[in-house]
């Protein structure tokens, strides 16, 4: 649909981030491989919570959840949020040129193209 809009409307530009693929690449069960590739020592458990994978109860008043000592080592902060480091990496991917994750343009390209110009990708 976005491609059709870009072809039919002069000046329409867009970019798409494959968030699922970006996170899936980092879900490595081998801690050494996760650290070597992405600098996360834990990509399975959450930093804050209790229970299975430390993924329940972070911030709940009646739950005595635990908080990890150094959140930048974790991919997930709790069961619903990534850590700040993970979000920084995703934002950098959005601005980078990894065509497996971002396309057809990076987020930087629409901001530097002159207005009312067609996308160069088509």
Image (cartoon, rainbow, N blue to C red):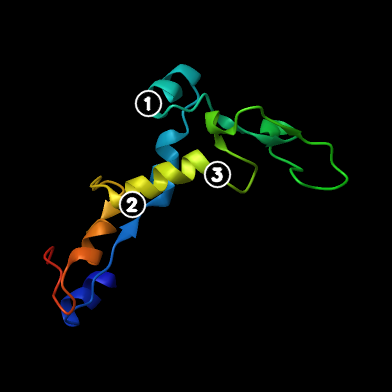
- The image quadrant that residue 55 belongs to is top right
Q: Position of residue 60 (x, y in %)?
A: 80, 47
Q: Which residue in the structure is indicated by mark 1?
A: 37
Residue at 46% of width from left, 28% of height from top? 28
Q: Which residue in the structure is indicated by mark 3?
A: 82
* Element class at badge 1: helix
Q: Earlier in the sequence, mark 2 or mark 3?
A: 3
Residue at 27% of width from left, 67% of height from top? 14
Residue 57 lies, with reference to residue 33, above or below; the image says below
**Tag on residue 94?**
2
Is residue 41 toward the left or the right of residue 91 in the image? right
Quarter of the figure with the N terminus:
bottom left
Depth check: give the residue in front, 98 or 51: 98
Task: For marks 2 and 3, give the CA distance.
Answer: 16 Å
- The image quadrant that residue 78 belongs to is top right
Residue at 25% of width from left, 45% of height from top? 98
Is residue 99 toward the left or the right of residue 48 in the image? left
The outermost residue toward the right is: 62
The outermost residue toward the bottom is: 9
Q: Earlier in the sequence, mark 1 or mark 3?
A: 1
Disc 1 crowd, CA 10 A, few/some/many (<14, 14-19, 20+): few
* Element class at badge 3: loop
Is residue 1 toward the left or the right of residue 122 in the image? right
Task: For marks 1 and 3, give the CA distance.
Answer: 17 Å
Q: Position of residue 101 (x, y in %)?
A: 31, 48
Disc 2 crowd, CA 10 A, few/some/many (<14, 14-19, 20+): many
- The image quadrant that residue 51 belongs to is top right
Q: Position of residue 25 (x, y in %)?
A: 40, 36
Residue at 55% of width from left, 41% of height from top? 83
Quarter of the figure with the C terminus:
bottom left
Disc 3 crowd, CA 10 A, few/some/many (<14, 14-19, 20+): some
Q: Earlier in the sequence, mark 2 or mark 1?
A: 1
């Amino acid at each position: 649909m976005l491609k059709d809009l870009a072809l039919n409307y002069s000046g329409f530009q867009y970019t798409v981030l494959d968030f699922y693929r970006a996170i899936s690449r980092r879900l490595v069960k081998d801690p050494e491989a996760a650290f070597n590739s992405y600098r996360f020592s834990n990509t399975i458990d959450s930093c804050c919570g209790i229970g299975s994978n430390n993924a329940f109860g972070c911030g709940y008043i009646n739950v005595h959840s635990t908080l990890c000592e150094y959140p930048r080592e974790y991919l997930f902060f709790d069961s619903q949020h990534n850590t700040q480091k993970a979000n920084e990496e995703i934002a950098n991917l959005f601005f980078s040129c990894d065509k497996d994750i971002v396309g057809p343009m990076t987020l930087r390209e629409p901001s530097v193209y002159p207005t009312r110009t067609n996308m160069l990708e088509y």
